[in-house]
Amino acid sequence: MTVLANDLADRIVDGPGGFSGVDGDEVWAAEVRRLLTLRGATLLAHNYQLPAIQDVADHVGDSLALSRIAAEAPEDTIVFAGVHFMAETAKILSPDKTVLIPDQRAGCSLADSISADELRAWKAEHPGAVVVSYVNTTAAVKAETDICCTSSNAVEVVASIPDDRDVLFCPDQFLGAHVRRVTGRKNLHVWAGECHVHAGINGDELADQARTHPDAELYVHPECGCATSALYLAGEGAFPADRVKILSTGGMLDAARESSARQVLVATEVGMLHQLRRAAPEIDFQAVNDRASCKYMKMITPAAMLRCLVDGADEVHVDPDVAAAARLSVQRMIEIGQPGGDE
Ligand code: SF4
């Protein structure tokens, strides 16, 4: 380690909200880039990361896109700036690589809303049912799953299952309700899980926003659980349908570059605003709910990143048998329809 890295590392403080004490400034960014080169590592950052983390990363995108980039990257070490299930998915798809997450305490309330034991018990109540799980799940839950899905292909995944088979859909109740409404399927059982962030995006709020911003468009990015309630409510008519765009991250950025709208409301985690404002500075992007900030995503701080690169921690491990079973459910997802996942 250099004197500079030592000096910065000495300032790191560990607290309940994560590691702090280091600013994400130019000196820090240069040190991060130097340490990444020293480790032969590539840095992948989720769209909902802090702006400083997004700006220093090699790639920014959603979880599935980043997992695919991880698998194809020539580097042997992947530093994944996101929450834990995302780093696990990268490890599932790249079992021979070292995958590091700057703070393994960065969890996900949606992924935590069902455990592998709970899923096994649910399956026992519905013998013969096909299990479809949203990608926001732990590796252990994916291993108990027949087909994973993203919100972009959840309808296609469920439609691919014979009509006479029961379907168990977990863990997101909003996405499950959306799929049930679109497919009209009566034998779709939905787990009552949810993400704490999306609880703040409700129907009254969306309807209010539509009234007070009559010319604004609404972008809903469905790849993270925080937006699935907006997806559901937009379908219920809480916002005029002709002004709603359901878009992946890449689609959202393309739409922003081509849009003639003066104002766009964004129903997703607030981290996405950083990239949109960079892509189309002339548009006024506003969060539907500016409290929709994921505290887990924000645990990947500049201090955590520095600690990760200096100490090689935290390394993500997935039991090889669990990873093999989980990989099958993820691969089935990729084979059915468009799982989304572009940057
Ligand atoms: S925003 Fe919600 S679904 Fe996304 S990582 Fe955070 S807790 Fe999980």
Image: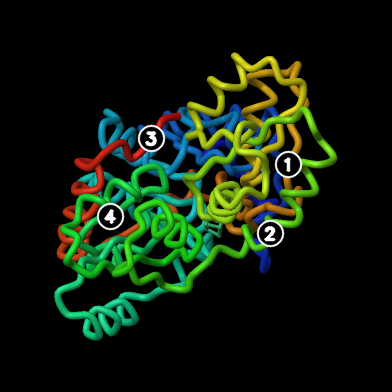
Q: Residues within 10 Å of mark 1 (few under 14, many from 20)?
A: some
Q: Residue at x 69, y 53 (%)?
A: 292
Considering only vertical position in the picture, is 192 above or below 202? below
- In the image, 54 versus 304, the foreground residue is 54
Percent across and percent down for residue 149 are 32, 51
The secondary structure type at the circle numbered 2 is: strand
Residue 129 in which image quadrant: bottom left
| First-in-chain label (2 vs 3) | 2
| Circles 4 and 3 in contact, beta carbons < 8 Å | no
Residue that badge 3 annotates: 41
Label 3 neighbourhood size at 10 Å, few (<14), some (14-19), many (20+)?
many
Asked which secondary structure carries label 1, the reply is strand
Tag 1 residue = 287
The amino acid sitting under disc 3 is Ala
Q: Work out how far the residue at label 4 is from the one at label 3, CA to CA, in angstroms.
A: 37 Å
User: SS at mark 4?
Assistant: helix
Give the CA distance from mark 2 to mark 3. 24 Å
Q: Amino acid at mark 4?
A: Val
Residue sitting at 58 percent across and 43 percent down? 48
Residue tagged 2: 13
Q: Earlier in the sequence, mark 1 or mark 2?
A: 2
N-terminal-most mark, 1 or 3: 3
Q: Residue at x 38, y 66 (%)?
A: 170
Image location (x, y in percent) of residue 160: 20, 50
Labels 1, 2: front one: 1
Q: Which mark is residue 158?
A: 4
* Left/right of residue 300 with respect to residue 111 in the rendered view: right
**Amino acid type of the residue tagged 2 in the rendering:** Val
Q: Nearer the viewer, mark 4 or mark 2?
A: 4
